[in-house]
Image: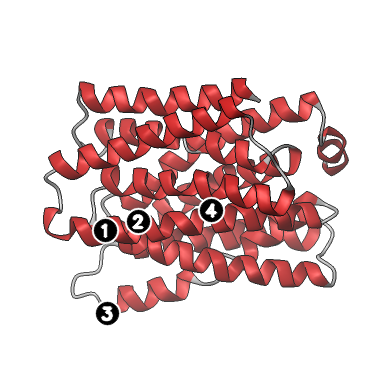
Amino acid sequence: MSDWIISLQGTEAGHQWAMILAMSAAVIHAAFGALQKGMHDPWLTRGSVDFFIFIFALPVALFLVPWPQGGEWVLLLGALCIHLIYKVGMAFAYSKGAFTVVYPVVRGTGPLFTVIGAWIIFGEVFAPLQWLGVAVLLSGIFGLAAYNLIHIQLQRETLVPALLIALATGAMVAIYTTYDAYAIRATPNPFTFLAWFFVITAIDFPPLAVLRYRRMVKPPPLRPLLIKGAIGAWLAFGSFGAVMLATRLDKVGEAAVLRETSTVFAALIGWLVLGETVGPRRMALMALIALGAVIVEMGG
């Protein structure tokens, strides 16, 4: 499988697969974000998800892929630090703001900085039409966030802090996307990095969640929380795994932009599942996001 992935790098087939993987990551990540924001405390949900990620990924890392060598362990430890900051930011943001307000800001901040980082680190260059697509996509994402800020009534008292945290967390999205792309390219076998990435980056939140659970006056029942964690683990494999493989196969910037169409799917989930309001104006802004992604793809 790894030989096949490597053989696709830099080819037209690799570009097509990268697009499919990035779009798949968008859908799955929207579901993953909604899961973390759902009825349980986001800190507990993330801890439960990471617990099952560790349980499911450890046998694969130990027995099915080559072990990391030398500097590859350093890359994995770097990923642990970066993703810990990102996960803490997401937990704080979800604790203070409505899903359809916070999520677009986090995801909208990421692609612009990722495109810039990909240019600096990987020498990737966007064509003028692709930059237009980025502008259209970002206008849709931040327009959606602004509309939500004005009209959404959920958690109004903590909305401004939530948006500030979401903005900072979005910067972390750009950092981890660029870093993970560098790390998976620097590892000869991409599945070695993927398997050990999930093991290493899942060791931080379960202890935090246990401490938080013990301090709660009325902690929630464990069974529903653990079921949600098991489902979330598989969503995380699909979301983060797909986009990292996409960045191995093709341009990091394009994969990052396509993944941020997750904002469209997140709004739909917020409306259909979480009961958050969606109207014609918000639908139009979501259409802008999708249009921007199409322009980026066509412009390349």
Of discs 3 and 1, which sits in the foreground? Answer: 1
- Between the C-alphas of marks 3 and 4, the distance is 33 Å
Mark-to-mark CA distance, 4 and 1:
19 Å
Please say which color scheme the image uses. secondary structure
Pointer 1 residue: 162
Q: Position of residue 3 (x, y in %)?
A: 88, 41
In this picture, residue 268 sits left or right of residue 184 = left
Q: Which residue is mark 3?
A: 215
Q: Amino acid at mark 1?
A: Ala
Answer whether labels 2 and 1 touch (C-beta < 8 Å): yes
The residue at 76%/51% (across/down) is 191
Residue that label 4 marks: 174
Mark 2, residue position: 166
Q: Earlier in the sequence, mark 3 or mark 1?
A: 1
Closer to the eye: label 3 or 4: 4
| Label 1 SS | helix
Name the element at disc 3: helix
Q: Viewer-nearest of labels 3 and 2?
A: 2
Amino acid on which the number 4 mark rests in the picture? Ala
How many residues crowd around disc 2 within 10 Å: few (fewer than 14), some, or many (20 or more)? many
Q: Please, what is the three-letter code of the amino acid marked with disc 2? A: Ala
In the rendered structure, which disc, 4 or 2, sits on the residue that comes first in sequence?
2
Q: Dot 4: within a 10 Å radius of its alpha carbon, few (fewer than 14), some, or many (20 or more) residues?
A: many
Q: Quadrant of the C terminus?
A: top right
In this view, 102 is above or below 26? below
Q: Mark 3: which amino acid?
A: Arg
In this picture, is 272 found above or below 111?
above
Crowding at mark 1 (Cα within 10 Å: few <14, some 14-19, many 20+): many
Q: Relative to 2, say whether 210 is above or below.
A: below
Return the disc, 4 or 1, that comes first in the chain's sequence: 1
